Image (cartoon, helix red, strand yellow):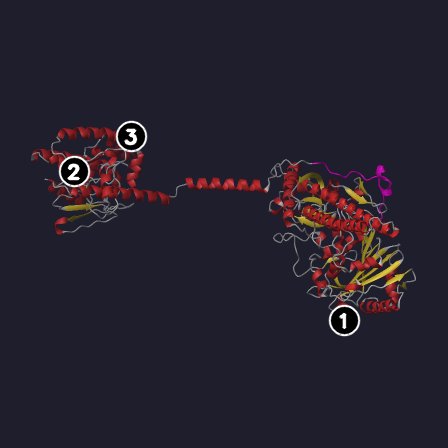
Amino acid sequence: METYSQLNRAQLSYDYLHTNSTTHEFLFGAIAELIDNARDAGATELDIYTIKDNSVRGNFLLCFADNGCGMTPDDVKNVIIFGKSLKKCEDTAAIGMYGNGLKSGSMRIGNDLVLFTKKDGVYTCLFLSRTFHEEEKLDEVVVPMPSFRGPEKTPIADTPEDKKKHDLEMHLILKYSPFRCLKDFYAQFDKLKESSGTVVIIYNMKLLDHGGPELDVTTNPRDILLSPGPEQETVEPDAEVLLPPERRSLRAYVSILYSDPRMKVYLQGRKVQTKRLLATLHSTRKYNFASKTFRTRAEADLAKAKNDVRIAELRAQEAESKARDCELRYQGSEDPEHLRQIRRLRNAAADLRGAVAMRQNVVTRKLKSIKDPKTLTFYFGVNVMNRACDGMFVYNCSRLIKMYQRIGPQQDSSMMCRGVVGIVDVPYMVLEPTHNKQDFADAKEYRQLMRAMADHLMQYWDDLGIDKEPDSLIRFWKSFGYLSARWRDPPSVEEKYARRRCCSISICVQCDKCLKWRILPFSQSLVGRDVPDNWQCRDNPDHKHKRCEDPEEDMSPPMGVLKRKIKTKEQRQAELEKQIRKKQEELELIQDPDDEKADDSNTTTRSSRLSGSMNAILSKSPRKRPLPPTAVISDLPNKRSTQSSSISRAMTVADKKRQAGLASSNGPVSLSSQKRTGLPLPTSNQRLPRPGGLVPKAQQRNSTSSKGRKVTATESESSEEYNETSDEEEEEEEEVGEKNGETSQLSFSKKTTSSLSKTKMGTSQIHEKNSSKTTTITVTDEVNGKRTATGKDKSPARDPVTMHHRNRNLTGRDNGDAASVTNKSQNKNDDSIGNKSIELDSTTNSLSTEANTAISKKIQEKFK
């Protein structure tokens, strides 16, 4: 090191003392760091007490005195090296492993620290003061460490330089510490009654905003409490639940700090009744859980072991090369010095090669540990003493890390799984805690642990079976004295309820001498009372465990089996995707009403185009004769021939059946009122055409030849063909009417329109307006050139099929035959009007009798 004494070195800033202390948000967690150090030192007793001193901030000193192994001057020097720890070993059960707990914990509690330790007859003091740095305006961390030898407290200073250094260190300690003289200073070593031990004194306490210290040592002289802040923290803010005692009282917190306590702790002069948390629960049960998901810590250790093997291999190769070079250099030499050098290099190379083999074995063992599943044991029980304090307690190497962590149904407002406490002790190889020992470094694996505990919690609740009946859960809690409906209210203090609660749990106490745990039989004298602090095995009424030499009883609860199926993340994701696909398929099957309207609109458009194409074809015909008023066929049915649907005919049997059915459903409708209007009503094959009618020629050709049948006009066809066609159409109409049934009625009741065919002279035009309430019919005289229409259909519509039929039958015949055909067509139209007038009965009845008569007369005059 002297070679590099002139080089720059990394320095630790004074500000780091404060930064390092901020890792502890929970003040009792900082105190627990000092308790952990005493436990790791092998102490069997720890005394935590306060000394009143008005000269320091907070007006008291906080002291921790243990009877552990103590520290030598070299060990004390390692204390001030941040991050260096001699406890890092796989086989040790030590809690500390970062070499940071003393510095971070003490600086969180107060500003200054004085440590007194004794080991092997050597006394050493360590002084770490932020007040000293602030007063002297130091940027680097300066730590005085004077040492003394023997009970006489002789300073260890062999050289003048050491003597000068010792005097400076003592001057600083006496100036900035609470001990203003050597007598008070040496008196602190006298507190170490045994051959070894350590005393840590913290002063200049941290204060709250109102000026008081964070630790309350006056309210309860036998306890140290957290001073209440401006807003009291709660476990359930919405329910206004008070903090559990472990978050307010240091005595309560220390009592459950370790899952298997083996150290007596005295707080303010009184022994802390440490607890085995599982023994304080009712109906306990344990479950084994094996998983291969906890690999982060094991993989990190494996990577470190492989790196150690690589470094050891390089060192061994270097030593072997040196030994080989020495052999070649002194080959054949018989000089003893040369032989000793060769032998020394060979031995060094062999030792390094052996170290490589040992590290390779470690890698093999760690590689196997990664593949092996990690087994954890979950413990569950019901907290009948205080049901509001429930949740999971997570320990790491017997040290409490997290408490009252509610999971699964406990997070809901229901009473399911409420009052249940879970316990798990996780080793370092499964989960690694953070530096402040208040959380875990790997948050992902910690969440996996909580999910596994939630599954086992549900299984425990099923095994418990206290909510099988509707009111059984309420009766269960009432049997223990919880008579209030409010969950946070404490139980009744009546004797019968207190005795019931005391009988339901085990009374487990620790011997003050051998520190073994004993289970006491139930006694009425123990109800509501604590066991004496000096209780020993000889006071046990159980004769089988009355001596300290007797082994402890088996306190393991019965084993439970997880029957619920635990699903992996991939399985849950696959099920969720399957459910999403199923819901999408169901959504596609549901037809939106807007889609139905769009379908109706498309059908109307196709009907309008078909009608327009037929009008365009017939408009080019050289023979045009006046046509009687007939119904406009807007849309030809898909399953009917063009010829049969183009002939105007009389009312068929199917029409009569439909009319009778509609009459029975809509009420009686007189046929005379239908004929009085003289208005043609739509047939069952009609649909509302869309305004317009201009379509491409290709579409016109397709519309004129539906299903391969073409419409032609031949003058040589006779009236017998017409009659035969009418008979065939009647039969087809009956069949189609029976098939369509109510579907046609409902379809055409929504979309109904009627108009009158125009003759060549065009004397009148009638349009109808289709709506849900009214229909307006306006008749205008075409001679004046006016065309008026109200409703959606504002363009005059023609019946191209009927016009073509008229041209075919009237050509080459006399006027009598034409008149006969006209009369037949008129009769058919009248019957058609009677057939379809039921669908417009509400609108037809709204017309006045005079208007109906006038319209009928005008139509008849035109046809005559």
Mark nearest the camera among 3 and 2 is 2
The Cα–Cα distance between marks 1 and 2, rounded to whole angstroms, is 119 Å
Main secondary-structure element of the magenta-colored stretch: loop
For mark 2, does the 10 Å Cα neighbourhood hold few (<14), some (14 to 19), or many (20 or more) residues? many
Tell me which segment is drawn in magenta.
534-559
Q: Are marks 1 and 2 in contact (CB under 8 Å)?
A: no
Which residue in the structure is indicated by mark 3? 738
Mark 1 vs 2, N-terminal side: 1
Q: Quadrant of residue 381?
A: top right
Who is closer to the viewer here, 178 or 588? 588
Whether residue 618 is in magenta: the answer is no
Which residue in the structure is indicated by mark 1? 136
Secondary structure of the residue carrying numbered label 3: helix
Q: Quadrant of residue 813?
A: top left
Indicate the position of residue 531 as horizontal and vertical percent values.
81, 46
Quadrant where the N terminus is found in the figure:
bottom right
Which residue in the structure is indicated by mark 2? 804
